[in-house]
Amino acid sequence: MRHLKWGLLLCALLMSSCSWFSKKTGQEPMELSGFKETARLKEVWSTDVGAGQGIGLTQLTPAIDGEKIYTVDHEGIVTALNRQKGSRLWSKNVTKDLTGVSGKVVHFFKDKDLNHSITGGISYADGMLYIGSYAGEVIALSAANGKEVWRKQIKGEISSVPQSNGQVVAVQTMNGKMFVLDAKSGADMWFFENPPPLLTLRGSAAPLVLDTAIYAGFANGRLMAFNPANGLILWEQRMALPKGRSDLDRMVDIHASPLLKDGILFVGTYQGRIAAVARGTGASVWGTDGSTSEILSASDDKLFVSQSDGRVVAYSLTSGEQLWQNEKLLRRRLGGPQVFGDYVAVVDFEGYMHVLNQSNGELAARDRVDRKGVRAPMLTDGKTLYVYGNGGSLMAFTASAKK
């Protein structure tokens, strides 16, 4: 079954690659055209933080805490930086002989670049950093100096960021399981299993872990809320129903973490819906047809979505009404949008960052930030945008209106 899943996924990727780049079908990425720039994009600083994402499909997203920002590369180099200046505070290599469930050293790939197995990003909570590996190890470090606090082996490949509320750590694996550990010791608390369908997107959504609930999306299109202490299911909601005859057509994966704003959870599904549900009950607030596998972002009154076809769309947070859409980046495989200042930014498969006006979606600025592309979701503190390029550079940008 596992080989069948990967075989189907490989076929799907090959077919989609042909459709993206073949001139005969007219489905190649839209060419970039010139426009009058109305914003000035400024690179505040740029720092090399290691080997970057590698050649796999990792999305090793940085983490922000106050005046610090933390990164991890695919080789296991963890770096703490001053968020304002980009200066290095400390660095540590957490890559040891990562072991599989048998306790033996695991070498997953023949390729040297893939033999390093950090695949599960980095997160911060209550003075601790949490990282996941391909081999299924959850690693906890002190955020103050990078000292290892504990390491825990779980059963499954970790392809999303372990998340914590300071009391528990929740991590989702590629085999449809969610493991919850004690944040201070790594001791087992509980786990939940939701077997994935035959065909899924590569990777899994990171759970949203709060004091009162853990919100997790799964590859079958279900969003679920759990009691963090004991795993009791508080509610569950089907966010999208499979459609079509083939396994590829029926994929409705929740691939990105839920976004919480003003007591409402916003969720996007692949080939399904963009929806808002009540945090406490899971009751539907609004929903509209859409497809995305990337993170969502929000300003005071707008929800921003990178649709799977390359459209950038803004919806009303309260009603779901479409406010605007930009179709100038079709089929350019956009990452998730991120808000900074009066603008919203997306990065495409060639590493171009496109800056749009929040008010109307018009292109305001553009810069090529990494020729190897950008897979990790961008971060923001509201005014500054942090971009972690596949090549290993962490960059900070601001934008302001041209006078």
Image: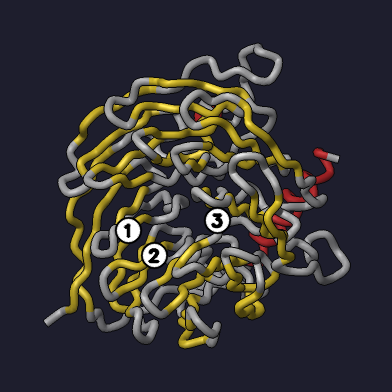
**Left or right, 400 with reference to 321:** left
Whether residue 21 can be seen here: no
Give the Cα separation between the discs numbered 2 and 1.
7 Å
Residue holding disc 1: 380
User: Which percent across, then down, holds residue 199?
Assistant: 78, 52
**Residue at horizontal 50 percent and vertical 62 percent from the top:** 259
**Foreground of the two, 389 or 135:** 135
User: Which percent across, then down, holds residue 184?
Assistant: 46, 27
Q: Secondary structure at mark 3?
A: loop
The disc at residue 257 is 3
Q: Amino acid at mark 3?
A: Ser
The disc at residue 338 is 2
First along the sequence among labels 2 and 1: 2
Q: Badge 3: how crowded within 10 Å, few (<14), some, or many (20+)?
A: many
Q: Amino acid at mark 2?
A: Gln
Q: Secondary structure at mark 1?
A: strand
